[in-house]
Structure formats: structure tokens, C-alpha cells
Image (cartoon, coloured by chain):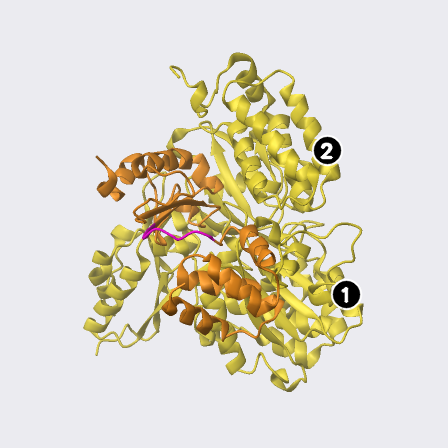
Chain colours: A yellow, B orange
Amino acid sequence: MAGCGAEVKKVLVCHGTGCISRGAEQIYSSLEREMSKLGLSNCTIKRTGCHGFCQRGPLVVIEPEGFFYCRVTPEDAPELALSLLPDGKPVERLFYRDPINDAPLPYYRDIPFYSKQQRLVLRNCGNIDPEDIEDYLAAGGYRALRKALSEMTPEDIIEEVKRSGLRGLGGAGFPTGTKWEVCRRTESKEKFVICNGDEGDPGAFQDRSTMEGDPHSIIEGMIIAAYAVGASQGIIYVRAEYPLAVKRMRIAINQARDKGFLGKDILGSGLNFDISIFQGAGAFVCGESTALVLSIEGKRGMPRSHPRPRLAEVGLWGRPTLLNNVKTFANIPLIIAYGSDWFASRGTEKSKGTAVFSLTGKVVNNGLIEVPMGTTLKEIIYEIGGGIPDGKAFKAVQTGGPSGGCLPASVLEMPVDFDSLIALGSMMGSGGMVVMDEDTCMVDVARYFIDFTMRESCGQCLPCRLGTKQMYDILDAITMGEGRPEDIDLLLDLSNAMKTGSLCALGQTAPNPVISTIRYFREEYEVHIREKKCPAGVCRALRPGQ
Amino acid sequence: MEKREERLLREILSLFKGEQGELIPILLQVQTSFGYLPEKAIKVISKFLGITESQVYSVASFYAYFRLKPLGRRRVSVCRGTACHIRGASEILREIETVLNLKEGETSDDLEYTLETVACFGCCALAPCISINQRVHGEMTREKVRGLFLDRVD
């Protein structure tokens, strides 16, 4: 038997959605076969969640050294296995190469994509086997839960979460501790804790990656929340379109139950709490809290009208319900384990901690990233993202999905946090960040998002149902060369009516892509209308010769 | 509904208690087994839960995941996520529509193909992407479309 040397080596094969699509499973089985042929006794091989650098996938990481191999194929397996021998040489041809001087960068910590990040929510993503609770425990998992149950009262926990400054990472940014406090204070014999994993934004996969890559961090956060607010039942709401997330969450719940972290009298503390999974059937509006609750009750997910009590007071089945996003829960174990001061030392004055983004579109390095709140758009797009590919010019960056806006080059120095993005006419949203280059038409992008919200509008209130339809017709006409000079003002009028008149956040924020593109790219609208031209060459009807 | 299908439906319902909160889980399970929600199944489910057929239908038609028509053998989904859109997903969709001679949402008469669009697969680094029976094909081009559907290319 050949060992890998004194230290145990871990071969981590990324099994995020991107790497799986590129053949990670075949790489895993080839590597496993080659490793067993060599009889490597001191090495383990693991399937991990998303390591982040989807652009260079399929990825294989060797720990403890931190060797980073990209664009791996099954044919590379024999050479990679040999490299694990005590006198083995790393496989240089699979290293990431510096895009400027082509120098190989063997370790992921040296790659700019990683070195500028700070991974809290994603702390274990890509480093542990999400289907093995022992990996999570070895990484310090469930220590925060022990601490919370043995050393802290529910009030202490709520105070700690409030002091941390953590705000809801589903997009709205409501202070988490305050929400917990309301739920704690509402008297009821039954309360619920729900994790919102109904990630519906197109172009966003950070919640899914967290569920797939580190499910126990979410479960641990939910148990601590249940103890703090006095809940006995938990529900993880996951889209049925995310079968892998459903599977991994289910395995994790069962393992947590076997270890006594879920069920009756958790760790001897007297706390009774268990978690089930509810699969959402695909409705963007169900990301809205009251709609989500209605869908669990087996109804159409149509948001409740205002004035309405808060979910923390009257929620699922009429009971007080605490609803937080996947990433919000994943932060809780860290805040409890390391304290609120540690957490609050990251971020800006009013937005603490980190932000997780799916960085996609016309950017060199696509992937899943996490940065401290307050990092500038420029740092994200150019230092982590590596800039715009093919020598093209940057045009806009879109955050917040269909509820957010498109921001131009002039605001790239702005720090990314909840409040500054809203001031610019966009929003944090759940974490989609799509980069657009000179070949992207902003009228087409506005039309694209309104098309999305028009399809997803629940149809209950008039401003949203008809507003999205009218806006779509106008935008479509402009892209067809049939726009009229008064259309821009009409779009802004409609936007205003929807913002003030719509019943829920979907309708109120749906005009943001239109308003922001008019605000920053009005000239492009005018050229479409006045000269019947699409400067980016996207709108088919306006291409020369059409 | 054939005997075999009735039995399958009864087996599914035996896993549930008959409470209203179970409607969506039941519909998901039925669709997983049948590929869609047959009209007769909706009738049986409404009796089982003690609600009207129109209530079941109103929920089934609200959520994008549910289908009321049978699926083709090869289910082609085109991602219309933002990253895919700005990398040309609409061109890809148009090409597939031409090659398969189907519009979005349609199934071919021979039940071979169903063409649909989805909000986002979350494989944005591979944009534009499509999936065929849940297997994702990334970095699509018009040429790759023709290669994938050679049986329908003249």
C-alpha cells in the first residue's frame, strides 16, 4: 500500500450544478478508480458543493496543500492520482493560469478570483462533503448550537443577533434580530420557523448552492432560531426545480436527527424541534412571505393585502412564523460561535457581514462569490470577475433580479450594500449580479425583465397585472421600431402608478429595471424611437436589412 | 383512466392523510409519476381532500411547475435566465423552435418532443444553456442545436 505521506490528503471534486453539467461525476468515478488502483491508503476523495469558480469547472481541489485544478477531464484522472503519491508531482498543465502573464497559479488562495473574497456563508461550500455530517462536525459544526443551548437564554441570542447588525439576506434587508424579537414576544402554543429557499430570480444560484454545499449550516441556524423564538416546527421551502438541493437537505435533516440535533429534548436542553421540507412548485411571487405561507397551506400563492399583521405575529396556519432566507440562517452559527462584535467588524455602518453574489453574464470569471458588504462594484467586476471578455466595453451591471436595476459605469466606485444600491435605483435582492457589455441593448433588457414579471404577476391587483402588460407592449413596440416620442414619459407614469398602487413587492419593484435603464441609458431609448436603430444591434427588427 | 393508473394514484394517495395542506405535495407526486396531471387524477384528488375540482385546478394552473398535458419523450427546456438572455438565449430558442417545428409550451404530435422555457437553471457560467430530460447542455450555439436534434434536421 502506498501512502500519500504523513498527512491525510483530501481530493475534493466539485459537484456544484455547473461542474456536474460539465461532467464532474465521471471525473469522480475515474479518480476513485485510479486512486484505488494505486492503493492510496492515506487519501480520501469527496464530492463537495459549489467551490465557486464555475467558469473554470470542472474543478478538483487537493487539500491540505490547496492545489487547484481546473477544466479537469476524466482522462486526467491517472495523472492526478499519481500526483498524490509521496513523491508525486502536481499536474501543472491543469493549474489556473494568470490571464496577463500566463504564469501558472497552483494554489487557489493565490488566484485573484478567490483572494479578494471573504467566505462566511460559503465557509464550507466546496470544502466538505455535504452529505456527511461528520465533515460538518469536523469543521466546527453544531458547536454554536451547543453553546446556544447550554450557555445562553433565548433573550441572549436575540440580543446577540440584534447587536451583530445582521439584516435579512433575501433582499429586503430587514433587521433579523428585530424580526426574531417580535416572533418571540407573540404568545402562542405553536410557532413555526421557515427557511425561504424559493430562489426564483433568474440569474441567481447562491441559495441553491448554499443548500447543496452546506445544508447543515442552515439547519443549525434554524434550530438556534427555534430556541430563540420558541418554535417547535421548522419547514425548509425549496423549489421542486432544485432536486439536488432537496435531496441534500433531506439527507442532512435525517443525519441531524440521528445525532440528536433535531427531535425531542435536543442535546438534553428540553427543546423540541423538527424540520420538514416543502417543495415549491415554481412561482416567483412565492418568494413574498405571505404568498409563500399560503402555498404551504395548499393555496394559490397570492400575497395578502395591506394592512396586514406581520408574519411573526400571524403566519402559517395563523400561528406566529419566523421566515428568513437561506443565507441569513447560515450566518447564525457564526454569530453565536464568534460573537456579534466579530461579525459586525465586517461590512459597512448599516450593512454588516458579507454579501453572496452569483456573478454572471459578460464577465471573464463567472461564479459564486462572497465579499464583505461595502466592496465596490468595480472590485467585484474587475478584480474578482476579471473584467469584460473579448476586449469589449463594460456597459451595465444588473443586481436584484427583476426587482433591481441596471447601473452604469459611472457608479462602479460605489460600495455594495443594502442602502447604497437602493439609492442608485437598484437593490441587493437575493444576490444575482449580471454584467452586461456593449453588445447588450438596455431596452431589450428592460423588456426582458418586464416580460418575466408579467408572466409571474399573480394577477390579483390591477396595477401589477395590467401595468406589466402595458409596459411590455410599449417596450416591445420600441424594440420593433414602432416607439413613439411620448412612450418614455408614459413608461415612467406607469412605473409610478405601479410603485404606489401595487399590493406587494413584486408589483412595486417590477418597474425598477425600466426606471433605471431610462435614468442611466435614456439616449438608447431615444435612438430606438427617433432613429429606429438599436445601437447594440440586438433588436432584430432594427437590424440593417430587416 | 386505466386500471394500472388508478392503482398508482391510489398508492400515492395512501401516503397522505387528506388534509388541505397536502395538495401541492400530492400534485408534485402525481406529476412525478405520471409526467403530468391527468384530468381524472384531479377529480380523484378533489374527492380525497374534500375540496372542489375547481380549487384543485386553480392551484394546479397557478404554479409553473404543473402541467395539464402529457409530456413528450424528450423534454427540451430552454433557460431564459438573465445570463442566458444576454448571451443569446432567444436566438437559441428560435432555432430550436424552427428545428423541432414547435412553439414554446407545445408537444409534438408523435409525443417525441416537448419544448418549454424555464426561469433559470442556475448554470449561468455555461450560458446560454438548455436541458434535455434534465441533462444540461451549456454554451449553446445554433450549430449545437442542430447537432442535438439531428433526427429533426432535414
Give the CA distance from mark 1 to mark 2.
35 Å
**Residue at position x 40%, y 61% in the image:** B34
User: Where's the N terminus of chain A, which quadrant?
Assistant: bottom left
Which region of the structure is painted magenta? Answer: B67-74
Q: Which mark is residue A181?
A: 1
Would residue A298 be found to the left or right of residue B95 on screen? right
Please tell me whether residue B5 is drawn above or below residue A445 in the rendered image.
below
Kind of residue at badge 1: Glu
Mark 1 secondary-structure assignment? helix
Kind of residue at badge 2: Ala
Crowding at mark 1 (Cα within 10 Å: few <14, some 14-19, many 20+): many
Quick one: B34 or A143, which is closer to the camera?
B34
Q: Is residue A276 visible?
A: yes
Instruction: Indicate yes or no whether the magenta region holds residue B133.
Output: no
Q: Position of residue A386 (x, y in %)?
A: 44, 40
For marks 1 and 2, give the one nearer the viewer: 2
Which residue was labeled with disc 2?
Answer: A497
**Residue at position x 72%, y 56% in the image:** A175
Q: Which mark is residue B105?
A: none
The extreme top residue here reads: A531
Quick one: A352 or A236, which is closer to the camera?
A236
